[in-house]
Image (cartoon, rainbow, N blue to C red):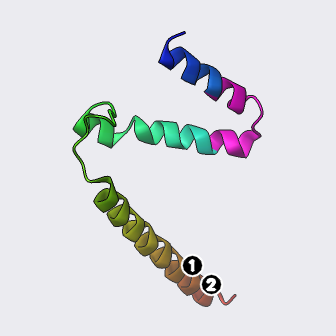
Amino acid sequence: MSKSVELLRRLDTCARQMNCDELEVLAVVAERLMGPGREQYGPLDIDSDGRDWDQEGGEEFIDAAVYGAVKCIANQRRKVREGC
């Protein structure tokens, strides 16, 4: 059995046990893998990809923290404006 067939089997086994929310998370992650990064860098090839994953991950983590903080502040301001 080829590696891709085995991986698809594993994904299928997991997906069949997931609820709708879990499937949605899986779909979003899969769609993200197919998005702009793939267009810019091509299909992910972990063995030959020269990016510094520690650096990339750190930057993405910081970006997520910024986005989360901005969302919290925006929500707080909205509640104040609405008198909540």
Q: Which mark is residue 75?
A: 1
Check disc 2 and report the residue beneath it: 79
- State yes or no: residue 23 in magenta: yes
Q: Where, by quadrant of the figure, is residue 59 drawn?
A: bottom left
Using the image as rendered, state which of residue 15 and residue 27 is in the foreground: 15
Q: Position of residue 84 (x, y in %)?
A: 70, 87
Q: Are marks 1 and 2 in contact (CB under 8 Å)?
A: yes
Q: Which quarter of the figure is the N terminus placed in?
A: top right
Query: Which range of residues does the magenta coloring cover?
Result: 11-24
Q: Residue at x 41, y 66 (%)?
A: 61
Q: Main secondary structure of the magenta part?
A: helix
Q: Is residue 43 above or below residue 36?
A: above
Using the image as rendered, state which of residue 59 and residue 77 is in the foreground: 59
Amino acid on which the number 1 mark rests in the picture: Asn
Q: Position of residue 38 (x, y in %)?
A: 31, 36
Q: Residue at x 47, y 37 (%)?
A: 31
Amino acid on which the number 2 mark rests in the picture: Lys
Q: Where, by quadrant of the figure, is residue 25 drawn?
A: top right
Q: Secondary structure at mark 2?
A: helix
Residue 18 relative to residue 83: left or right: right
State the CA–CA distance, disc 1 to disc 2: 6 Å
Q: Secondary structure at mark 1?
A: helix
